[in-house]
Amino acid sequence: MKKLITCFILLLAFIGASSKLKAQQRFQATWESLKTYQTPDWFKDAKFGIFIHWGVYSVPAYKNEWYPRLMYQQGSDEFKHHVETYGPQNKFGYKDFIPMFKAEKFDAGAWAALFKKSGAKYVVPVAEHHDGFAMYKTALSKWNAAEMGPKRDIIGELSQAICNQGLIFGLSSHRIEHWFFMNGGRKFDSDVNDPKYADFYGPAREENETPSPEYMNDWLLRCTELVDQYKPQLFWFDWWIEQPAMDPYRKSFASYYYNKGLEWNKGVVLNYKNVSFPEGSAVLDIERGKLTGIRELPWQTDDAVGFKSWGYIPDDSYKSAKYLITNLVDIVSKNGNLLLNIGPRSDGTIADEQQQLLLSIGKWLDVNGEAIYETRPWKTFGEGPTEVIGGSFGDDKMKPFTSADIRFTTKGDALYAIALDIPTTALNIKSLSLKSNNGTVASVELLGSTEKIIWSQKPDALVIQPSKNYPSENAVSFKISFKK
């Protein structure tokens, strides 16, 4: 009996210790606690994701997804276009586009299959943009896609289809920016001033006004509702959550979300811009831009297939497959991920140009994915003559890469050297010269090919002779092994 009691006491002590450990793992709504966050391996391994900007703004499809704001800004092109096309804003406001947003050809399964073919590992649809229209079934507003417009839970359908393809599901909320988004409509006779629509257009306050506690609490409720309903493994925020008044709300949401990740036993990622979160407490995202060197912590670029808009417009100017592929490689070599945005039409179809770009990336990754997925940065991100512009909003200033621009990634004992154009002459990789002391090369292989590569490691460079038949377009990857 004495032995039994001793065992029972030891068992209780073990259970108590386990409970204490679990309690210690829980995140508190403090920066000190949140800084203990660790980016999950799935994100560090994934490298490539799809962003989706789709909403009521795809009906007018004019200029960009900020149409709902700018159509109420007197003197803007959008204001003039709206009056000429639809009539004055007190007769036809943004709300009147909602019945026209039917999504009649939307097929979540077909979308998810396309994203799988693109080589993406995670997908992030916009759950609510600045316009205030929720693309999901919410208990907090009647202005949502399940009750109006398509009358379908778009986010719910996408979450299921994406998971069915074995991809990670995430989402974004731009709700906080709605505080000021429709404020132009306050300054003249428009439906923004109609009390019947205050729950949609409001608050429509000035951007320099601090959001009210009621509004910030509503933001927090909407975010936690999204977490509870759809269990996203990535939650993306735009820039305006950096308002100083949002500090306690940011901390509360982050701790709630991270603890849900522990409860689900799944790693979760929270994306932020600028300085909304302290270093290490979430994952930095840079809009339409890049870094000039390796960042120790994982990070992400969100970019779009088009130069002009995130949402669909018929006259967008699309980036080339080479642009997108080589930028993906550059970002990955610096410990980053690329979240690439598409904008579907209002009927739920994806433009052919956008589909072809995604398929081109997928085709390249089919050959070269070994040098991208599950890799980590090397000692240096790369070498070459093309200078990269750091920071946000630099996508239209990027110079095209050349075959002399090399980027490095590593996995296990292998080093991957990726030329950012197709080499037509010998490739000289200075970082792998004999005098660099970065290792004695044992072998060089061309990914996707059985061709024997001719190479020599010289004092000033590793020299790789051009292939007779490169297996991929836009960029090529060499797998390099070293003598031990």
Image (cartoon, helix red, strand yellow):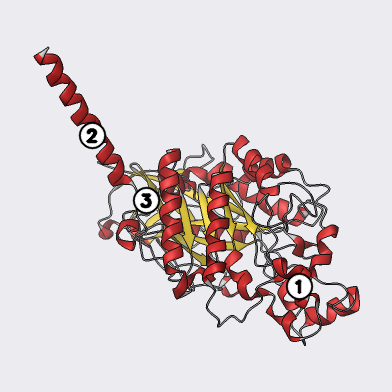
| Residue 443 falls left or right of residue 121 | left
Image point 46% across, 57% down: which residue? 253
Local crowd size for mark 3, using a 10 Å CA cut-off: few (<14), some (14–19), many (≥20): some
Tag 2: amino acid: Gly
Residue 71, image x and y in percent? 77, 77
Determine the secondary structure under disc 1. Answer: helix
Disc 3 designates what residue? 456
In the figure, 13 relative to 397: above or below? above
Q: Which of pointers 1 and 3 lies earlier in the amino acid sequence?
A: 1
Q: Which of pointers 3 and 2 lies earlier in the amino acid sequence?
A: 2
Determine the secondary structure under disc 3. Answer: strand
Disc 1 designates what residue? 195
Disc 2 designates what residue? 16
| Residue 412 falls left or right of residue 472 | left
Q: Quadrant of the N terminus?
A: top left
**Tag 1 near tag 3, CB within 8 Å:** no
Residue 311, image x and y in percent? 71, 63
Image point 57% across, 62% down: which residue? 218
Residue farthest toward the top in the current orientation of the protein: 1
Tag 1: amino acid: Pro
Local crowd size for mark 2, using a 10 Å CA cut-off: few (<14), some (14–19), many (≥20): few
Query: CA gap, disc 3 to disc 2?
Result: 62 Å
Q: How many circles with numbers are drawn on the protein?
A: 3
Image point 51% across, 70% down: which residue? 213
